[in-house]
Amino acid sequence: MTRVRLVAVSLLLFACPAWADEPTPVGLVVAVARCPDSAPFVAALLQRGISPVTGDAPFSLELRGSGDDVHAVLVDRSGETLLDRTLPSGECTAVADTVALLVERRLEGVSWEAPPVEPPPRPARTKTAPPSRPTPTRAVERPRISFDLLAGIFFETGFEEDDPGPGPEIGGRLHLARAATVGASLGWLRHDAIEVGAGSLRIDRVPLSLFGAWSRRRSGLELDLEARIQLEILAARTRGIADPGRTTEVSLRAGPGASLAVELEAPVWIVVHAGLLALLAGPDLVVHTIGERGERTPVATQGPAIELGAAAAWRFGGGERSTRRRP
């Protein structure tokens, strides 16, 4: 007899898993005019081990009432009516407790099964292409054109008798590409100390230089190796003698040079340069007649020239780099 009872209890537990494991899910619909809020009904059902749900459930409870009465209908998933009661009016909490008690008693001993849960579909396998290797690229920098406006002082020899002091100089440089520069400069020098008999000789020199350069540039530093040609206008006049004379001549020089530019703060640069100029063409200066026979004697003799200078430069353009990539 004891074994029969144990088997019966075991079968009952397997048939009604909701009693032992979890609350009974019940779909709840509340449409009661006197109690529009479903919160009291939900709380009362939860206290009795009944879980109101909004989705699929083995039981469905509908509460409706347009007047004072509340009509409660409980059906199972097949549509069979398990409870159909009309309750008198009262407070919403009291009506909710009464409905929960009726549902609890009616569901005692009623078995139910949760709907089967379908496993999620397996994601489709897709073949992924191997990552492509990036095409090697190299940066191509377009030439940046910039222009320097220079103003400074320079010193230049060129006469065997006397060397003048420093004089002013202006000029410009055009940077055409990464390693090419062209430019020009114009200066002015004066000699005052060449003695001619009882007087003296004054010479004004106006050198006009043209040059091309190969440039080596780094951040804030530039070195130029130059090839320079110079056309110099010479205006000479004697002073302090009875028969003063004057003349104007032109000389031509050429030679190598170098300059170094250092960036102080954009766009200002400091430029120093040096050069050696060989005399290609240029007569000696003859400005006074000496002797009883009237022969003309040179009083100033030209020779090779050494040029030194320093200037401040203002740079225009060249601030943006235009780059692109090529495979």
Image: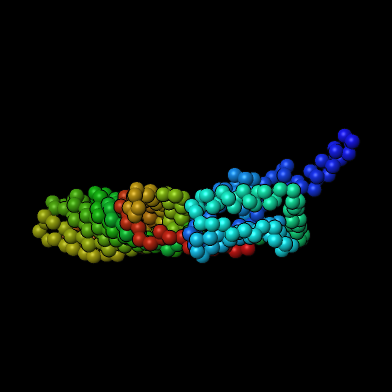
Whether residue 174 can be seen here: yes
Q: Quadrant of the N terminus?
A: top right
Residue that protrudes farthest toward the top in the picture: 2
Q: How is the image coloured?
A: rainbow
Instruction: Tell whether 228 sits left or right of 298.
Output: right
Closer to us: 299 or 127: 127
Picture quarter containing residue 184? bottom left
Q: Is residue 21 left or right of residue 53?
A: right
- Quadrant holding the C terminus: bottom right
- Residue 306, position as x, y percentages in the image: 35, 50
Residue 269 in view: no
Q: Nearer the viewer, residue 303 or 151?
A: 151
Of 257 and 304, the residue lying toward us:
257
Q: In x, y percent, where is residue 115?
A: 74, 56
In the image, what residue occupies the spot 76% across and 51% down? 111
Q: Would residue 6 appear left or right of 72 to someone viewing this image?
A: right
Asked whether 168 or 146 is in front, the reply is 146
In the picture, residue 212 is in which quadrant? bottom left
Splitting the image into 4 quarters, where does residue 174 fall? bottom left
Which residue sits at x=13%, y=56%? 239
At x 56%, y 49%, the residue is: 97
Q: How many marks?
A: 0
Q: Position of residue 256 (x, y in %)?
A: 42, 55
Residue 255, horizontal then vertical, whole percent: 41, 56
Q: Residue at x 43, y 51 (%)?
A: 222
